[in-house]
Image: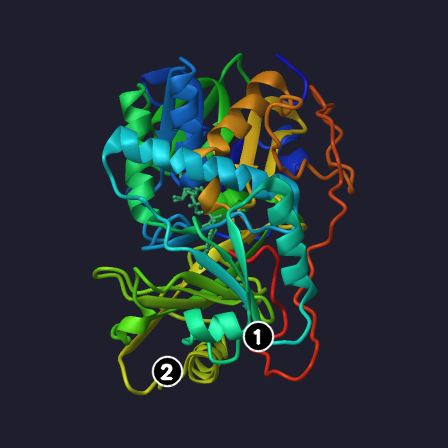
Amino acid sequence: MRAGVGVYHAGARDAPRAGLGRDLCSEPLTMPTASTTEAFDLLVVGGGAFGLGTAAEAARRGRTVAVIERGPLPNPVAASYGPSRKIRSTYTEPHYAALAREAMTGWRQIERETGAELYLAVGNLAYTALDEQPHLDALEAVSRQIGADVELLDQAAMRARFPQFLLAKRAILERDAGFVRASACIEALRVVAERAGAVILPEREIVAIDLDGPSVVVATAGAERFRGERAVLALGGWTKRLLPELGDVLTQTQQGIMYLAEVPDALRSPGFPAWGCSDDGVYGFPAWKSDPFKIAHHTQSPAVESPDFDRMTTPAGFVDDMRAFLRDHLGIDPDAAPLRAESCMYNLSPTSDFLIDFHPRDARLLVATGGSGHGFKFGSVIGSAVMDRLEIGRARAGARSSPGTTWSRRRPLPGGCGSRSEPEARVASRPRAPIMPSLGRTKRYGDRALDPLG
Ligand SMILES: Cc1cc2nc3c(=O)[nH]c(=O)nc-3n(C[C@H](O)[C@H](O)[C@H](O)COP(=O)(O)OP(=O)(O)OC[C@H]3O[C@@H](n4cnc5c(N)ncnc54)[C@H](O)[C@@H]3O)c2cc1C
Protein backbone atom coordinates (compact mmCIF):
# COMPACT_ATOMS: atom_id res chain seq x y z
CA MET A 1 0.00 0.00 0.00
CA ARG A 2 1.44 3.36 -0.97
CA ALA A 3 1.01 6.67 0.67
CA GLY A 4 -1.24 9.19 -0.97
CA VAL A 5 -3.47 6.84 -2.87
CA GLY A 6 -7.18 6.24 -2.85
CA VAL A 7 -10.28 6.66 -4.92
CA TYR A 8 -11.60 9.55 -6.92
CA HIS A 9 -15.20 9.50 -7.79
CA ALA A 10 -17.59 11.85 -9.47
CA GLY A 11 -20.04 13.05 -6.86
CA ALA A 12 -23.42 14.67 -7.24
CA ARG A 13 -23.46 16.52 -10.51
CA ASP A 14 -21.60 19.81 -10.15
CA ALA A 15 -22.02 20.04 -6.41
CA PRO A 16 -19.11 21.80 -4.71
CA ARG A 17 -16.45 19.20 -3.98
CA ALA A 18 -14.16 18.81 -1.06
CA GLY A 19 -10.89 18.63 -2.96
CA LEU A 20 -8.29 16.04 -3.68
CA GLY A 21 -6.93 15.57 -0.19
CA ARG A 22 -10.23 14.58 1.33
CA ASP A 23 -11.20 12.42 -1.61
CA LEU A 24 -7.97 10.53 -1.47
CA CYS A 25 -7.57 10.21 2.26
CA SER A 26 -10.85 9.77 3.96
CA GLU A 27 -13.58 8.60 1.65
CA PRO A 28 -14.38 4.91 1.69
CA LEU A 29 -13.67 2.79 -1.33
CA THR A 30 -16.74 2.98 -3.49
CA MET A 31 -15.46 1.54 -6.74
CA PRO A 32 -18.12 -0.22 -8.72
CA THR A 33 -17.16 -3.86 -8.87
CA ALA A 34 -17.18 -6.21 -11.80
CA SER A 35 -15.86 -9.66 -12.39
CA THR A 36 -13.31 -8.80 -15.08
CA THR A 37 -10.96 -5.89 -15.51
CA GLU A 38 -9.37 -5.33 -18.90
CA ALA A 39 -5.72 -4.29 -18.64
CA PHE A 40 -3.76 -1.83 -20.81
CA ASP A 41 -0.45 0.01 -20.65
CA LEU A 42 -2.34 3.29 -20.86
CA LEU A 43 -5.90 4.36 -20.27
CA VAL A 44 -7.00 7.58 -21.94
CA VAL A 45 -10.21 9.00 -20.56
CA GLY A 46 -11.90 11.39 -22.99
CA GLY A 47 -12.25 11.05 -26.75
CA GLY A 48 -11.74 14.64 -27.89
CA ALA A 49 -8.76 15.99 -29.80
CA PHE A 50 -6.50 15.75 -26.76
CA GLY A 51 -7.53 12.21 -25.83
CA LEU A 52 -7.60 10.66 -29.29
CA GLY A 53 -4.39 12.45 -30.29
CA THR A 54 -2.73 10.97 -27.21
CA ALA A 55 -4.09 7.49 -27.87
CA ALA A 56 -2.93 7.54 -31.49
CA GLU A 57 0.58 8.52 -30.44
CA ALA A 58 0.69 6.00 -27.57
CA ALA A 59 -0.38 3.20 -29.91
CA ARG A 60 2.23 4.29 -32.47
CA ARG A 61 4.82 4.00 -29.70
CA GLY A 62 3.79 0.41 -29.13
CA ARG A 63 1.69 0.87 -26.00
CA THR A 64 -1.55 -1.00 -25.49
CA VAL A 65 -4.08 1.76 -25.01
CA ALA A 66 -7.81 2.19 -24.52
CA VAL A 67 -9.79 5.40 -25.00
CA ILE A 68 -12.85 5.60 -22.79
CA GLU A 69 -15.42 8.22 -23.81
CA ARG A 70 -18.68 9.02 -22.08
CA GLY A 71 -20.58 9.76 -25.28
CA PRO A 72 -20.46 8.86 -28.96
CA LEU A 73 -17.40 9.66 -31.06
CA PRO A 74 -17.36 12.43 -32.06
CA ASN A 75 -19.41 13.68 -29.14
CA PRO A 76 -21.78 16.53 -30.12
CA VAL A 77 -21.35 18.27 -26.75
CA ALA A 78 -17.54 18.05 -26.73
CA ALA A 79 -15.39 21.03 -27.68
CA SER A 80 -13.89 18.95 -30.48
CA TYR A 81 -17.17 18.79 -32.40
CA GLY A 82 -18.39 20.88 -35.32
CA PRO A 83 -17.70 21.76 -38.92
CA SER A 84 -14.60 23.89 -38.44
CA ARG A 85 -11.77 25.04 -36.21
CA LYS A 86 -9.12 27.58 -37.16
CA ILE A 87 -5.67 26.36 -38.02
CA ARG A 88 -3.08 29.11 -38.21
CA SER A 89 0.36 29.87 -36.87
CA THR A 90 -0.24 33.56 -36.26
CA TYR A 91 0.37 33.49 -32.52
CA THR A 92 2.01 36.14 -30.38
CA GLU A 93 4.08 33.41 -28.73
CA PRO A 94 6.72 31.69 -30.86
CA HIS A 95 6.33 28.25 -29.25
CA TYR A 96 2.66 28.06 -30.17
CA ALA A 97 3.39 29.43 -33.63
CA ALA A 98 6.06 26.79 -34.22
CA LEU A 99 3.87 24.02 -32.85
CA ALA A 100 1.03 25.14 -35.12
CA ARG A 101 3.32 24.74 -38.12
CA GLU A 102 4.05 21.19 -36.94
CA ALA A 103 0.33 20.62 -36.51
CA MET A 104 -0.33 21.68 -40.11
CA THR A 105 2.16 19.07 -41.30
CA GLY A 106 0.61 16.59 -38.89
CA TRP A 107 -2.91 17.01 -40.29
CA ARG A 108 -1.57 16.56 -43.84
CA GLN A 109 0.03 13.30 -42.71
CA ILE A 110 -3.28 12.12 -41.20
CA GLU A 111 -5.03 13.05 -44.44
CA ARG A 112 -2.58 10.83 -46.33
CA GLU A 113 -3.08 7.98 -43.88
CA THR A 114 -6.87 8.12 -43.92
CA GLY A 115 -7.76 9.59 -47.31
CA ALA A 116 -10.01 12.11 -45.52
CA GLU A 117 -10.19 15.80 -46.43
CA LEU A 118 -9.44 17.52 -43.13
CA TYR A 119 -7.39 20.71 -43.58
CA LEU A 120 -8.66 23.42 -45.88
CA ALA A 121 -5.82 25.85 -46.52
CA VAL A 122 -8.12 28.68 -47.60
CA GLY A 123 -5.93 31.26 -45.85
CA ASN A 124 -6.47 33.06 -42.58
CA LEU A 125 -6.76 36.80 -42.43
CA ALA A 126 -6.17 38.71 -39.18
CA TYR A 127 -7.26 42.30 -39.66
CA THR A 128 -7.80 45.58 -37.85
CA ALA A 129 -10.20 48.41 -38.40
CA LEU A 130 -8.00 50.71 -36.34
CA ASP A 131 -5.07 52.93 -37.25
CA GLU A 132 -2.86 51.11 -34.77
CA GLN A 133 -3.15 47.53 -33.60
CA PRO A 134 -0.23 46.17 -31.56
CA HIS A 135 -1.72 42.68 -31.72
CA LEU A 136 -1.18 42.57 -35.48
CA ASP A 137 2.34 43.94 -35.02
CA ALA A 138 3.09 41.09 -32.60
CA LEU A 139 1.63 38.48 -34.96
CA GLU A 140 3.70 39.83 -37.80
CA ALA A 141 6.92 39.76 -35.76
CA VAL A 142 6.41 36.14 -34.66
CA SER A 143 5.37 35.04 -38.15
CA ARG A 144 8.63 36.41 -39.54
CA GLN A 145 10.57 34.74 -36.73
CA ILE A 146 9.22 31.28 -37.48
CA GLY A 147 9.13 31.69 -41.25
CA ALA A 148 5.36 31.46 -41.71
CA ASP A 149 3.90 32.06 -45.14
CA VAL A 150 2.37 35.47 -44.49
CA GLU A 151 1.55 38.51 -46.56
CA LEU A 152 0.90 42.01 -45.21
CA LEU A 153 -2.01 43.89 -46.71
CA ASP A 154 -2.56 47.63 -46.30
CA GLN A 155 -5.90 49.33 -46.71
CA ALA A 156 -5.57 49.65 -50.49
CA ALA A 157 -4.60 46.00 -50.82
CA MET A 158 -7.51 44.95 -48.62
CA ARG A 159 -9.93 46.96 -50.78
CA ALA A 160 -8.56 45.29 -53.88
CA ARG A 161 -8.27 41.72 -52.56
CA PHE A 162 -10.91 41.46 -49.84
CA PRO A 163 -13.47 44.23 -50.29
CA GLN A 164 -15.85 42.11 -48.17
CA PHE A 165 -14.17 43.56 -45.04
CA LEU A 166 -15.63 47.03 -45.19
CA LEU A 167 -13.70 48.53 -42.27
CA ALA A 168 -10.32 46.81 -42.63
CA LYS A 169 -7.30 49.09 -42.57
CA ARG A 170 -4.54 46.50 -42.35
CA ALA A 171 -4.26 42.73 -42.30
CA ILE A 172 -1.94 39.75 -42.16
CA LEU A 173 -2.88 36.92 -44.51
CA GLU A 174 -1.34 33.55 -43.66
CA ARG A 175 -1.70 31.84 -46.99
CA ASP A 176 -1.49 28.21 -45.93
CA ALA A 177 -3.63 28.61 -42.81
CA GLY A 178 -7.39 28.06 -42.85
CA PHE A 179 -9.59 25.60 -41.04
CA VAL A 180 -9.71 21.96 -40.08
CA ARG A 181 -12.97 20.04 -40.25
CA ALA A 182 -13.27 19.27 -36.55
CA SER A 183 -15.67 16.32 -36.47
CA ALA A 184 -14.01 14.76 -39.52
CA CYS A 185 -10.64 15.18 -37.78
CA ILE A 186 -11.94 13.31 -34.73
CA GLU A 187 -13.14 10.48 -36.96
CA ALA A 188 -9.74 10.41 -38.67
CA LEU A 189 -7.85 10.42 -35.36
CA ARG A 190 -9.98 7.49 -34.29
CA VAL A 191 -9.10 5.61 -37.48
CA VAL A 192 -5.40 6.32 -37.02
CA ALA A 193 -5.52 5.29 -33.36
CA GLU A 194 -7.43 2.08 -34.08
CA ARG A 195 -5.15 1.12 -36.94
CA ALA A 196 -2.20 1.50 -34.59
CA GLY A 197 -3.95 -0.84 -32.16
CA ALA A 198 -5.84 1.43 -29.77
CA VAL A 199 -9.15 0.16 -28.39
CA ILE A 200 -11.92 2.78 -28.53
CA LEU A 201 -14.70 2.44 -25.97
CA PRO A 202 -17.47 5.00 -26.46
CA GLU A 203 -20.61 5.43 -24.34
CA ARG A 204 -18.82 4.75 -21.07
CA GLU A 205 -18.56 7.45 -18.43
CA ILE A 206 -15.74 7.06 -15.94
CA VAL A 207 -17.08 7.80 -12.48
CA ALA A 208 -14.25 6.56 -10.27
CA ILE A 209 -10.49 6.18 -10.34
CA ASP A 210 -8.84 3.77 -7.92
CA LEU A 211 -5.17 4.39 -7.17
CA ASP A 212 -4.88 1.96 -4.29
CA GLY A 213 -3.29 -0.94 -6.12
CA PRO A 214 -0.24 -1.25 -8.34
CA SER A 215 -2.32 -0.18 -11.38
CA VAL A 216 -4.72 2.62 -12.05
CA VAL A 217 -8.25 1.21 -12.17
CA VAL A 218 -11.11 3.24 -13.61
CA ALA A 219 -14.76 2.32 -13.33
CA THR A 220 -17.65 3.30 -15.54
CA ALA A 221 -21.15 4.24 -14.48
CA GLY A 222 -22.13 0.81 -15.82
CA ALA A 223 -19.69 -0.88 -13.39
CA GLU A 224 -17.13 -1.90 -16.02
CA ARG A 225 -13.55 -1.64 -14.82
CA PHE A 226 -10.39 -1.00 -16.81
CA ARG A 227 -6.85 -1.29 -15.54
CA GLY A 228 -3.85 0.65 -16.80
CA GLU A 229 -0.29 1.15 -15.72
CA ARG A 230 -1.00 4.83 -16.21
CA ALA A 231 -3.88 7.04 -17.23
CA VAL A 232 -4.20 10.27 -19.17
CA LEU A 233 -7.24 12.31 -18.21
CA ALA A 234 -8.30 14.34 -21.25
CA LEU A 235 -11.71 15.30 -19.94
CA GLY A 236 -12.03 18.77 -21.43
CA GLY A 237 -14.65 20.88 -19.67
CA TRP A 238 -15.65 17.92 -17.50
CA THR A 239 -12.23 17.65 -15.82
CA LYS A 240 -13.40 19.10 -12.51
CA ARG A 241 -15.99 16.37 -12.08
CA LEU A 242 -13.25 13.82 -11.50
CA LEU A 243 -10.63 16.31 -10.28
CA PRO A 244 -12.49 18.93 -8.24
CA GLU A 245 -9.17 20.20 -6.94
CA LEU A 246 -8.76 21.93 -10.31
CA GLY A 247 -11.74 24.12 -9.45
CA ASP A 248 -9.65 27.27 -9.23
CA VAL A 249 -7.54 26.43 -12.24
CA LEU A 250 -10.01 25.62 -14.99
CA THR A 251 -12.98 27.75 -16.00
CA GLN A 252 -15.76 26.61 -18.32
CA THR A 253 -17.56 29.19 -20.37
CA GLN A 254 -20.41 29.11 -22.83
CA GLN A 255 -19.31 30.36 -26.24
CA GLY A 256 -21.81 31.33 -28.91
CA ILE A 257 -21.57 30.31 -32.55
CA MET A 258 -23.78 31.67 -35.34
CA TYR A 259 -24.36 30.07 -38.74
CA LEU A 260 -25.77 31.81 -41.81
CA ALA A 261 -27.50 29.44 -44.18
CA GLU A 262 -27.14 31.65 -47.22
CA VAL A 263 -24.44 34.17 -47.99
CA PRO A 264 -23.22 35.85 -51.18
CA ASP A 265 -20.63 33.87 -53.16
CA ALA A 266 -18.06 36.45 -52.09
CA LEU A 267 -18.19 34.91 -48.59
CA ARG A 268 -17.65 31.40 -49.86
CA SER A 269 -14.47 29.37 -50.14
CA PRO A 270 -12.40 29.04 -52.25
CA GLY A 271 -11.83 32.75 -52.54
CA PHE A 272 -12.84 33.87 -49.09
CA PRO A 273 -10.54 32.98 -46.17
CA ALA A 274 -11.02 32.21 -42.52
CA TRP A 275 -10.66 35.48 -40.67
CA GLY A 276 -10.51 37.25 -37.32
CA CYS A 277 -10.77 40.86 -36.26
CA SER A 278 -7.88 41.64 -33.91
CA ASP A 279 -9.77 44.58 -32.41
CA ASP A 280 -12.52 42.65 -30.68
CA GLY A 281 -12.00 38.92 -31.14
CA VAL A 282 -14.83 38.32 -33.60
CA TYR A 283 -13.82 35.65 -36.11
CA GLY A 284 -15.34 33.46 -38.75
CA PHE A 285 -15.17 30.87 -41.47
CA PRO A 286 -16.25 30.95 -45.10
CA ALA A 287 -19.19 28.98 -46.38
CA TRP A 288 -17.68 25.82 -47.88
CA LYS A 289 -19.56 23.19 -49.86
CA SER A 290 -22.65 22.47 -47.73
CA ASP A 291 -21.13 24.02 -44.58
CA PRO A 292 -22.67 27.38 -43.74
CA PHE A 293 -20.84 30.65 -43.10
CA LYS A 294 -19.91 30.74 -39.42
CA ILE A 295 -19.18 33.64 -37.08
CA ALA A 296 -18.19 33.54 -33.40
CA HIS A 297 -16.56 35.59 -30.69
CA HIS A 298 -13.34 34.69 -28.87
CA THR A 299 -14.20 36.43 -25.65
CA GLN A 300 -14.50 35.47 -22.02
CA SER A 301 -18.16 34.71 -21.44
CA PRO A 302 -19.46 34.21 -17.91
CA ALA A 303 -18.53 30.86 -16.39
CA VAL A 304 -21.12 28.08 -16.57
CA GLU A 305 -22.19 26.07 -13.53
CA SER A 306 -22.51 22.79 -15.39
CA PRO A 307 -20.55 21.53 -18.40
CA ASP A 308 -23.79 19.92 -19.55
CA PHE A 309 -25.56 23.24 -20.17
CA ASP A 310 -28.01 23.43 -23.07
CA ARG A 311 -25.93 23.90 -26.25
CA MET A 312 -28.97 25.33 -28.04
CA THR A 313 -28.86 28.51 -25.91
CA THR A 314 -26.34 31.36 -26.36
CA PRO A 315 -24.72 33.84 -23.98
CA ALA A 316 -26.62 37.07 -23.34
CA GLY A 317 -25.95 39.64 -26.04
CA PHE A 318 -24.16 37.23 -28.38
CA VAL A 319 -26.74 37.18 -31.15
CA ASP A 320 -27.18 40.97 -31.13
CA ASP A 321 -23.41 41.53 -31.17
CA MET A 322 -22.93 39.17 -34.11
CA ARG A 323 -25.81 40.71 -36.05
CA ALA A 324 -24.27 44.16 -35.54
CA PHE A 325 -20.83 42.92 -36.59
CA LEU A 326 -22.19 41.31 -39.74
CA ARG A 327 -23.86 44.54 -40.71
CA ASP A 328 -21.00 46.89 -39.81
CA HIS A 329 -17.96 44.87 -40.93
CA LEU A 330 -19.26 42.64 -43.72
CA GLY A 331 -22.26 44.55 -45.06
CA ILE A 332 -24.57 41.60 -44.46
CA ASP A 333 -28.19 42.28 -43.60
CA PRO A 334 -28.77 39.79 -40.77
CA ASP A 335 -32.51 39.85 -41.47
CA ALA A 336 -32.04 38.77 -45.06
CA ALA A 337 -31.04 35.15 -44.46
CA PRO A 338 -31.87 32.47 -41.89
CA LEU A 339 -29.53 32.52 -38.89
CA ARG A 340 -28.93 29.69 -36.46
CA ALA A 341 -27.11 30.11 -33.15
CA GLU A 342 -25.84 27.54 -30.65
CA SER A 343 -23.03 27.19 -28.13
CA CYS A 344 -19.91 25.25 -27.38
CA MET A 345 -17.81 25.15 -24.20
CA TYR A 346 -14.37 26.62 -23.58
CA ASN A 347 -12.22 25.04 -20.90
CA LEU A 348 -9.91 27.90 -19.97
CA SER A 349 -6.70 27.68 -17.99
CA PRO A 350 -5.57 30.80 -16.12
CA THR A 351 -3.15 31.73 -18.89
CA SER A 352 -4.85 30.09 -21.89
CA ASP A 353 -1.90 27.67 -21.95
CA PHE A 354 -2.65 23.96 -21.95
CA LEU A 355 -2.44 21.99 -18.74
CA ILE A 356 -0.31 18.93 -19.45
CA ASP A 357 1.05 17.67 -16.18
CA PHE A 358 1.17 14.86 -13.67
CA HIS A 359 -1.22 14.91 -10.81
CA PRO A 360 0.85 16.14 -7.88
CA ARG A 361 -0.28 13.25 -5.70
CA ASP A 362 0.22 10.38 -8.12
CA ALA A 363 2.44 10.49 -11.18
CA ARG A 364 0.54 7.62 -12.77
CA LEU A 365 -2.14 10.18 -13.63
CA LEU A 366 -1.42 12.81 -16.26
CA VAL A 367 -3.92 15.55 -16.95
CA ALA A 368 -4.07 16.85 -20.54
CA THR A 369 -6.56 19.63 -20.94
CA GLY A 370 -7.04 23.41 -20.89
CA GLY A 371 -7.58 23.79 -24.64
CA SER A 372 -8.64 27.37 -23.84
CA GLY A 373 -10.45 28.02 -27.08
CA HIS A 374 -7.42 27.39 -29.32
CA GLY A 375 -6.41 23.77 -28.74
CA PHE A 376 -8.06 21.87 -31.56
CA LYS A 377 -5.57 22.72 -34.28
CA PHE A 378 -2.89 20.93 -32.26
CA GLY A 379 -4.81 17.63 -32.25
CA SER A 380 -2.39 16.17 -34.81
CA VAL A 381 0.65 16.77 -32.56
CA ILE A 382 -0.67 17.12 -29.01
CA GLY A 383 -0.24 13.38 -28.50
CA SER A 384 3.52 13.71 -28.90
CA ALA A 385 3.63 16.46 -26.29
CA VAL A 386 1.50 14.41 -23.89
CA MET A 387 3.42 11.17 -24.41
CA ASP A 388 6.78 12.94 -24.08
CA ARG A 389 5.58 14.39 -20.81
CA LEU A 390 4.33 11.01 -19.66
CA GLU A 391 7.35 8.97 -20.70
CA ILE A 392 10.23 11.39 -20.32
CA GLY A 393 8.78 13.40 -17.46
CA ARG A 394 9.03 16.65 -19.31
CA ALA A 395 9.02 17.86 -22.86
CA ARG A 396 12.13 16.61 -24.59
CA ALA A 397 14.69 19.42 -24.43
CA GLY A 398 15.13 21.01 -27.78
CA ALA A 399 13.10 18.41 -29.62
CA ARG A 400 9.74 20.03 -29.41
CA SER A 401 8.58 23.31 -28.06
CA SER A 402 5.76 22.06 -25.96
CA PRO A 403 3.59 24.70 -24.41
CA GLY A 404 1.94 23.62 -21.25
CA THR A 405 0.73 25.05 -18.03
CA THR A 406 2.12 22.97 -15.25
CA TRP A 407 0.19 22.14 -12.14
CA SER A 408 -0.27 25.23 -10.03
CA ARG A 409 0.95 24.98 -6.48
CA ARG A 410 -0.21 28.39 -5.47
CA ARG A 411 -2.39 26.79 -2.83
CA PRO A 412 -1.15 23.88 -0.76
CA LEU A 413 -3.12 20.73 -1.42
CA PRO A 414 -5.43 19.88 1.41
CA GLY A 415 -5.37 16.64 3.32
CA GLY A 416 -1.83 15.88 4.41
CA CYS A 417 -1.80 12.50 2.68
CA GLY A 418 1.81 12.75 1.74
CA SER A 419 2.59 12.84 -1.89
CA ARG A 420 4.35 10.61 -4.31
CA SER A 421 6.45 12.00 -7.08
CA GLU A 422 6.03 15.73 -6.84
CA PRO A 423 6.43 16.99 -10.37
CA GLU A 424 8.30 20.09 -11.23
CA ALA A 425 5.78 22.89 -11.02
CA ARG A 426 5.75 26.27 -12.62
CA VAL A 427 3.13 28.79 -11.82
CA ALA A 428 2.37 30.16 -15.21
CA SER A 429 3.00 33.86 -15.10
CA ARG A 430 1.28 35.22 -18.17
CA PRO A 431 -2.17 36.32 -17.09
CA ARG A 432 -5.09 35.59 -19.35
CA ALA A 433 -6.15 39.06 -20.25
CA PRO A 434 -7.87 40.96 -22.96
CA ILE A 435 -5.09 41.86 -25.36
CA MET A 436 -7.19 43.56 -27.96
CA PRO A 437 -6.61 47.07 -26.61
CA SER A 438 -9.47 49.50 -26.73
CA LEU A 439 -7.97 52.08 -29.01
CA GLY A 440 -11.20 53.90 -29.53
CA ARG A 441 -13.03 54.92 -32.66
CA THR A 442 -14.56 51.68 -33.83
CA LYS A 443 -17.45 50.02 -32.13
CA ARG A 444 -16.48 47.07 -29.97
CA TYR A 445 -18.52 43.91 -29.78
CA GLY A 446 -18.04 42.96 -26.16
CA ASP A 447 -14.93 44.00 -24.30
CA ARG A 448 -13.27 40.84 -23.07
CA ALA A 449 -11.62 39.49 -26.17
CA LEU A 450 -9.03 36.83 -25.51
CA ASP A 451 -5.69 35.99 -26.99
CA PRO A 452 -4.86 33.71 -28.77
CA LEU A 453 -7.64 34.09 -31.27
CA GLY A 454 -9.06 30.63 -32.04
C1 LIG B 1 -16.80 27.67 -29.92
C2 LIG B 1 -15.42 27.12 -29.94
C3 LIG B 1 -14.54 27.54 -30.93
C4 LIG B 1 -13.23 27.07 -30.96
N1 LIG B 1 -12.43 27.47 -31.97
C5 LIG B 1 -11.19 26.93 -32.09
C6 LIG B 1 -10.42 27.22 -33.23
O1 LIG B 1 -10.83 27.95 -34.12
N2 LIG B 1 -9.19 26.64 -33.32
C7 LIG B 1 -8.70 25.81 -32.36
O2 LIG B 1 -7.59 25.33 -32.50
N3 LIG B 1 -9.44 25.51 -31.26
C8 LIG B 1 -10.67 26.04 -31.12
N4 LIG B 1 -11.45 25.74 -30.04
C9 LIG B 1 -10.88 24.95 -28.94
C10 LIG B 1 -10.86 23.49 -29.21
O3 LIG B 1 -12.07 23.08 -29.80
C11 LIG B 1 -10.60 22.76 -27.90
O4 LIG B 1 -9.43 23.29 -27.28
C12 LIG B 1 -10.39 21.28 -28.11
O5 LIG B 1 -11.40 20.73 -28.91
C13 LIG B 1 -10.36 20.61 -26.74
O6 LIG B 1 -10.26 19.21 -26.90
P1 LIG B 1 -10.34 18.27 -25.63
O7 LIG B 1 -10.06 16.90 -26.09
O8 LIG B 1 -9.50 18.83 -24.53
O9 LIG B 1 -11.82 18.44 -25.07
P2 LIG B 1 -13.20 17.81 -25.64
O10 LIG B 1 -13.22 17.84 -27.10
O11 LIG B 1 -14.32 18.48 -24.93
O12 LIG B 1 -13.10 16.29 -25.20
C14 LIG B 1 -13.25 15.87 -23.86
C15 LIG B 1 -13.98 14.55 -23.94
O13 LIG B 1 -13.93 13.93 -22.65
C16 LIG B 1 -15.16 13.24 -22.50
N5 LIG B 1 -15.35 12.99 -21.06
C17 LIG B 1 -15.47 13.92 -20.10
N6 LIG B 1 -15.63 13.33 -18.89
C18 LIG B 1 -15.60 12.00 -19.11
C19 LIG B 1 -15.71 10.88 -18.25
N7 LIG B 1 -15.87 11.01 -16.93
N8 LIG B 1 -15.65 9.64 -18.80
C20 LIG B 1 -15.45 9.49 -20.14
N9 LIG B 1 -15.34 10.53 -21.00
C21 LIG B 1 -15.41 11.77 -20.49
C22 LIG B 1 -16.18 14.19 -23.08
O14 LIG B 1 -17.38 13.56 -23.40
C23 LIG B 1 -15.45 14.71 -24.30
O15 LIG B 1 -15.73 13.97 -25.46
C24 LIG B 1 -12.78 26.18 -29.98
C25 LIG B 1 -13.65 25.73 -28.98
C26 LIG B 1 -14.96 26.19 -28.97
C27 LIG B 1 -15.87 25.71 -27.89
Instruction: Give percent across and percent down for residue 428.
Output: 73, 43
Left or right relative to 170: residue 440:
right
As helix, strand or loop, the secondary structure at mark 1 comes to loop
Indicate whether 184 appears above or below 151. above
Residue at 68% in and 36% down: 407
Confirm if mark 1 falls within 8 A of ligand 1. no
Query: Which residue, given by chain and number where applicable, does mark 2 sit on?
Result: 332
Say which quarter of the image contains residue 137.
Answer: bottom right
Front position among marks 2 and 1: 1
Question: Which numbered disc covers residue 158?
Answer: none
Amino acid marked by disc 2? Ile
Indicate whether 17 appears above or below 38. below
Looking at the rendered image, the quarter that the N terminus falls into is top right
Please indicate, yes or no, whether residue 14 appears anywhere in the rendered image.
Answer: yes
**How far, Cα to Cα, is label 2 from label 1?**
19 Å
Amino acid marked by disc 1? Lys
Left or right relative to 98: residue 308:
left
Query: Which residue, given by chain and number where applicable, does mark 1 sit on?
Result: 169
Instruction: Give percent across and percent down for residue 445.
Output: 56, 77
Say which quarter of the image contains residue 194.
Answer: top left
Please indicate, yes or no, whether residue 206 appears anywhere in the rendered image.
Answer: no
Residue at 48% in and 40% down: 378
